[in-house]
Image: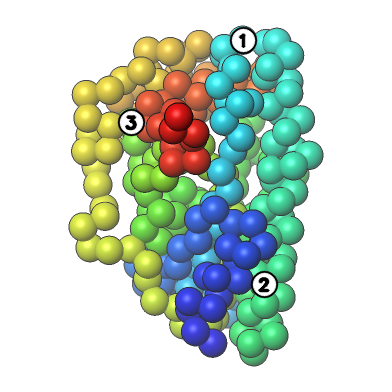
């Protein structure tokens, strides 16, 4: 199997971003060892799906119909599309003779640990290892194409895939964001600091309304390449 064929297939079923990371390039922040999903795991496939700009652009960080619309959109479209793409990509790999485990989980089914939503796998860190972006001051993945306006799925596989991250793509949050701190300044519950997040405060407000204001106000997201230019 050619890696380019796998990437082309995944994009053909709707993925906006696709990247590969080698298991040996992952650090402990990724969470459960890939071998717990697939014995002999060699690679991680990271899929990114861009969020709809119009929905994010209306968010205020308050409890209102805009935030409830975002919640419905995420659960009934975005996460379900990621689930579908993960499953289809896993089947594609199986047809090539490899094993694959799609570990994207609908947010509603994500288990809680000490009151917080908890994932067995750190998708953002895997995306960094795959070269899809870097972590910004808001602790979110910031992609060159869409800023933070993406949601992710990951697959573990025993297929030997080359890393798609280039050596010069690993950046610090300060290099990603420069002097900008608008996400920190706009957070409704003051949960963000520079490169830090108070998970308790953030989770509390996320439980009240689907906030995502740190995504919405990020200038890099507002300048996403899918915007009309004139």
- At 39% from the left and 76% from the top, the residue drawn is 162
- At 55% from the left and 75% from the top, the residue drawn is 6
- Residue 77 pos. (x, y %): 74, 42
* Mark 2 crowdedness (10 Å alpha carbons): few <14, some 14-19, many ≥20: many
- Image quarter hosting the C terminus: top left
* Mark 3 crowdedness (10 Å alpha carbons): few <14, some 14-19, many ≥20: many
Dot 1: element: loop
Q: Earlier in the sequence, mark 3 or mark 2?
A: 2
* Mark 1 crowdedness (10 Å alpha carbons): few <14, some 14-19, many ≥20: some
Relative to residue 129, is residue 93 depicted above or below? below
The answer to which of 73 and 193 lies nearer the viewer is 73
- At 54% from the left and 53% from the top, the residue drawn is 16
Would you name the residue on which mark 2 appears? 90
Would you name the residue on which mark 3 appears? 137
Q: With 120 as the anchor, is 195 left or right in this view?
A: left
- Residue 81 pos. (x, y %): 71, 51
């Amino acid at each position: 199997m050619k890696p380019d064929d796998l990437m082309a297939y995944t994009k053909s079923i709707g993925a906006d971003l696709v990247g590969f990371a080698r298991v040996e390039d992952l650090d402990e922040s990724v969470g459960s060892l890939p071998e717990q999903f697939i014995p002999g795991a060699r690679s991680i496939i990271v899929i990114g799906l861009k969020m709809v700009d119009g929905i994010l652009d209306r968010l205020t960080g308050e409890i209102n119909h805009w935030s409830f619309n975002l919640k419905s959109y995420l659960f009934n479209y975005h996460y379900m599309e990621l689930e579908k793409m993960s499953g289809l990509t896993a089947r594609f790999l199986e047809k090539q003779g490899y094993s694959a485990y799609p570990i994207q989980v609908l947010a509603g089914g994500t288990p809680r640990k000490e009151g917080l939503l908890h994932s067995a796998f750190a998708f953002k860190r895997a995306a960094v290892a795959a070269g899809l972006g870097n972590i910004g001051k808001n602790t979110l993945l910031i992609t060159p194409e869409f800023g933070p306006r993406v949601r992710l799925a990951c697959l573990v596989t025993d297929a030997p895939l080359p890393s798609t991250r280039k050596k010069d793509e690993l950046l610090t949050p300060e290099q990603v964001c420069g002097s900008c701190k608008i996400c920190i300044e706009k957070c409704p519950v003051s949960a963000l600091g520079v490169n830090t997040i108070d998970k308790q405060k953030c989770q509390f407000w996320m439980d009240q309304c689907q906030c995502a204001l740190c995504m919405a106000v990020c200038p890099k997201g507002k300048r996403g390449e899918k915007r009309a230019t004139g």
